[in-house]
Amino acid sequence: MNLPPSPEPLLAVQDLTVSYRTRTARIQALRNVSLTLKPGETLGIVGESGCGKSTLGWSIVNFLGANGFIQSGSIRFEGQELVGRSDRQLQQLRGNRIAMVFQDPLQALNPALQLGEQMREVLRVHQQMSKAEATTRCIETLKRVHMPDAAGLLDRYPHQISGGQQQRVVIAMALLNDPALLILDEPTTALDVTVEAAVLDLVAELRQTLETALLFISHNLGVIARICDRVAVMYAGEIVEQATVTEIFQSPRHPYTQGLIRCVPRLGTDKNSSMLFPIPGRVPRPDERPAGCLFSTRCQYAEERCRTEAPLLRSLPSGTQVRCHLTEQIDPQRWTPPAEAEMPPPKTSPASPSLLLTGSHLHKAYPVPGTSLASLVGLEKRRSVKAVDDVSLKVDKGTTLGIVGESGSGKSTLVKSIIGLEGIDHGSLEFMGMEIHQPLSRRTLETIRELQMVFQNPDSTMNPSYTVGQQIARPLERFHTVPRSQIRDEVVRLLRAVRLNQTYYDRYPRQLSGGEKQRVGIARALASQPSLILCDEPVSALDVSVQAAILNLLLEVQAANQTTLILIAHDLSVVRFIADQVAVMYLGQIVESGPVDALYAPPYHPYTEALLSAVPEPDPTLQRSRIRLEGEVPSAINPPTGCRFHTRCPRRSWMPDGGQRCQTEAPVYQEASPGHQILCHLPLATLQRLESETLSV
Amino acid sequence: MNSTTLSPPTQPPGLLRKLANILSILLGSRTAVTGLAVVLFWLGIGLLSLVWTPHPPNAQAFDANLPPTSTNWMGTDHLGRDIWSRVMAGTQVVLLKTRLSTDPQVVVPGGVALWGVIGAVVVGGLLGVNAGYRGGRVDQAIMQLLDALIAFPVIVLYLVIVTALGSGDVVVVLAITITGAPGVARLVRGLTLDIKTREYIRAAETRGESANYIMLREILPNARGPILVDAMLRVGYAIFAIGTLGFLGLGLPPPDPDWGSMVNDARKYIYANPIAILWPALAIATLVIGVNLFADGLREELTRYQQ
Amino acid sequence: MARFLVRNLVSMGTTMLLVSALLFLLLEVAGGDITVRLLGVFASPEQRDSLRRQLGLDAPAWQRYLDWLVGSDWRARPLSAYPLVTTPNPQSGEAEWWAEVAGVLTRWRLVDGELTAIQRAADGTESTAPAQTVWQRAPDGSEIFWGVDIRNNLVQWQRGSDLEVLVLSEAGVRSERGGPQHYIPLRKGIVRGDAGMSLQSNRPVSATIFSRAANSLILAGAAFLLVMPLALFCGVLAGVHEGRPLDRIISITGLGFTATPEFVIGIFLILIFGIWLRWLPATAVFLTGDAILRDPKILVLPILTLMAAEFGYVARITRASMAEVMQTPYIRTAFLKGLPRQRVIFRHALRNALLAPVTVIMLQINWLIGGVIVVEVLFGIPGLGSYIYDAAIFGDFNAVAAAAMLTVSIAVLTRLAGDLLYLYLNPRIRFA
């Protein structure tokens, strides 16, 4: 800290307990939470969903909605007690001394008002500035968050700018009055990985230049590692561990923290050399919290004492605060996975690879409704989004193809075309020797049976009206996989295969946790005994501890049935962990593809390089190269000429002609090593140098 | 695996719990309970009137236009009939029976309002789910047709239908169906557009399920909550409309008493017997308000329950 | 923007076309036998047949639909020997069809089996002269002549034909021979402002319908303008205080008003103010056209009734919309920016919250029209509502159809206005 030590911390929360009233009971969302924040310091709050992270943020400004209230405890901010203050007094602090930024920037901005008006009013209300003064101040602040054309922006409406820009505006709005405390609640979760990286850069930069203290709430350990000085780990409404960021990641003392760190996939690991260890069980609901230590139900070290006596948050000599009876006895180095943990089977590569699916020169375009009068009467040329544009791919039986890309890259359309939810415009798609480019309605039942899908969102993957058993039984009936009399047995077998016991048969989806629903989704896909399962972001909506279990389950299923997987993900570490082959997509094209180990090492496609560099890694000591993409993803209606990526390519200047060729001429695939293809004009030798060059910059 | 022997029976406990659950939701809302009480009151009156009324409802047994007395609790009408008996019996055509023909008397259980709403829900539901799920030209065609129907002021449409087809229970049922179907279709279409984006619909499609299976088995069961509440509100509108038609002299035909027609008759003698008009008018108003309160309370509780 | 307008107009046109077809279908096909109503039940089939021919009902339904919609003069003109013109009757001012023979307005009628020409001079006087017709030879050898008769039909006369025609007149049915074979009732069609003759009053529908509509407009407009600010205000108030006593009071009152049929509210008002307190007239008495302006008191109870019916609906929609907006993240943001509550409500919430009501209120015009019918019948106001009601009771097809088309046009136009207002209020569409 380069600030003089202050007698009192900026924010001191003491024994804070917050409850929500529901129809039947009171639910404690926070229990005895204590923390302090010094001026200019950044404290990260991390934990899984339902652990009370956001409630903590809300309670500091006492904005808990109609049914939430602070039951006990104190919140001191700049020496004043905030608990028990009137709304009017808090109003003077909110947006002035304490500002907040939330997850979805589009929803945080009023759709009916110009951005300028929404920004200026913060200054006019709190500082009684004139309109001209406020405008000047807004433009200055927008420049500080690196918004181009700051003056012009003030006249625009929120829907007219991109998600990344919206989040910058929201951050700028929060900074207008130079707040002493800025609370950021999952500020990058709704953003694409390259945009997220740029926003995180901004937050990191602001930390250096401002004297504002940050309370940074995130479920993502990688993001926390990048941004924070200190970290508080929350579990079921309590802080279970609080320490400096290096302590947390290098010597975590609470079994929950240790478990969290063990279940995060990293870029450095691949599925042959490393493993993910899920934490068994799930965060207990408020009404089923155990008596003693809240984590005792999932803790493999738990003793009798843990189940009866609630541990207190105590300080260790290292300065770490931890809420555990046994922390001194636990040595994470000597940890072994518990017997009941789900572990992936050892990887066995098929002896002789045989081709299962071949797509060549696939094209899929969606017509775009015109916006002009001419288009209505058919005078204008019909425009279309080329969602998939000349994509070729090959998948071997029993392997996993990972498809990576940001939103709008066409990865979902590609998968939908393969499974037949969308027809293919032209190109050929050969599956087990049959041509299957036609949409589902014209495929044979046999082909339909062979291709199944696992979906992204656990809350909508199951029909709420039917029981688990009914939903898994339906494909069995439809495809006559087993005789009618054996359907129930088969459903139970499938449930066991995804590690659910048969008591789940009669449960409804609303009685299941997210991870359990995802398991049922996998069982349902397995029911028809397909050769190929397409997974659309199967873990992106799950908590990390559950994520690992589902990924392990997919690998297990694959090993047991020799199933082929195609998996879409935006998370490069997940793909790194699970895939054999990887394809990187940008604006409808595959820009790089190859075996997983080759792809995650140079030579890279410049886009892959930027994606890799954007991934926040859960390691505060790691110094990665910082390749950032400029601008926004161009519209797929009017894709750039030549190389699609040339408008944002950070390496274009390395071309001998300064990148003229990238603008005019479409590149062709270069073979870097057997099966590893890169769609770029830059010579392979140059691409090989990328990583080392960056480090020396 | 020996799971067949272990498998517990699936039906009864779930169903019982469901019922208990619905009941507890209902009783949780003061609005719903008040509404339910009013509806049950009139239902009880109607059932009672099937077996007993103080006087025969159609008998001209008293002096005309009497004020309330101890024999005629609500007085008598212009033909000397007991108003309270007629109000009681008036519940029947609305809630309890529909006369398919009067000569010979063919009666089916379930009132005109109920059958009309059932018709509207079935027709509107099927149109809406098809428009929403199939989209494109089917959607456009259906919505254009419904737009044309919605463009009619409801009473004008009633007038036109009744002018064209004459009056009678079946025509009123038809009129309620035609005027109600567009609203139901819009609601169901909206729900379908939402439900259609869910991944379990994708799962059904990737199983190669037919469009009919997806619409009837995958989509509609998940739309039943809002449809049910809407249907209840529509029963309210239907009773409202039957009353208005009766008032306009186009309602349910005699001999059975009909509240709207009673109001219309009493209006002509409003100076001679002002109080007579009050009773049937109150009957319509309380029943409609009761149904609305019930539906409203139910909706509120259902949304809260889902949260 | 232009695209939006064009698309809306196209959709509106289609809607109106469908509505007209629907109306025609319902009233024409299911409407029963008009001759029963005009001739009574004891007429012979021949008489009915003849009358049907005179009314042009022997033409196929699609032909009559087109005649009704866009007029029959298109197909009549090529048949007629002389140009057809319309001119107002000097007495009644109603439009009449004439043929122009060498600059003279001429019609024809049969007098004792002989075709006679009626000529109208420029000063409006009419004179009769033996017809100097040019008989044309038809392919079957008979001599025919197409001319305008005195009932605005284009008629084909055939020389020497003995087909019997039963002419309906005030005195009863009269049999005539020697001439008319086919009738094409001449009309300009409803889209050109000619809704045909009212069967009830025997006057053109368009002659009465507009003055009636003006009365209704005053009634409905006054109710709308008075209730809208009140309902919006109460709705916003309830939405901001969601779940609190004030909200309960407004919501329950609104529900009570919406759920009570207009005629019940009207009757209560009549009982209280008209009969027991005698403050206001219980029914409206219209002796002269401008009675509304001379004695506005007669409109108080009708307007109050309409207001009550509208209030609940608008207030409830506004409340729901306001309550929903108050829960959105951007309102949360506004509060967390430290803005005063008033500013959050008026600058941030109100505009978004009023989006839903404007479209719904405009759709609501249908309810208002329905209410207007009931109120006009109840209070005896000669407006569009009571007009359509009387026509419907009588079975007057032309009048019902015209009035229904008029109400539908009003509904469709207000919906367009609502869409435009929505467009104006919603920058997400305006700057798409």
Image: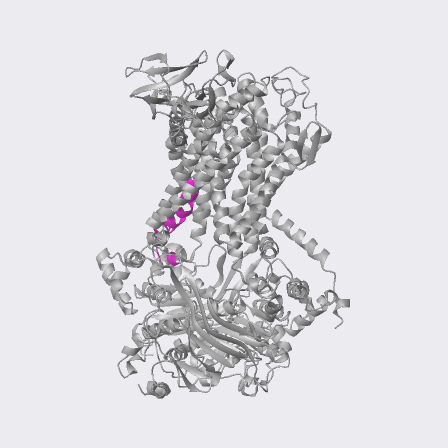
Q: Residue A55: x percent and y percent?
A: 47, 64
Task: State whether residue C137 appears in this view.
Answer: yes
Q: Quadrant of the C terminus of chain A?
A: bottom left
Q: Which is more toward the observer, A50 or A514?
A: A514
User: Residue C339 in magenta?
Assistant: yes
At horizontal 38% and vertical 42% (from top left) the residue drawn is: C416
- Res. B10 image quadrant: bottom right
User: Residue C116 in magenta?
Assistant: no
> How is the structure coloured here?
one colour
Q: Is residue A347 above or below residue C281?
A: below
Q: Which is more toward the observer, B3 or B20?
A: B3
Q: Which residue is the extreme one toward the right?
A: B5
Q: Which residue is the extreme one toward the front?
A: C141
Q: Which is more toward the observer, B298 or A271?
A: A271
Q: Quadrant of the N terminus of chain A?
A: bottom left
Q: Residue A398: x percent and y percent?
A: 58, 80
Q: Which residue is the extreme one toward the left?
A: A132
Q: Which residues are magenta?
A: C333-362
C184 displayed left or right of C50:
left
At horizontal 39% and vertical 69% (from top left) the residue drawn is: A11
Q: Residue A618: x percent and y percent?
A: 45, 79
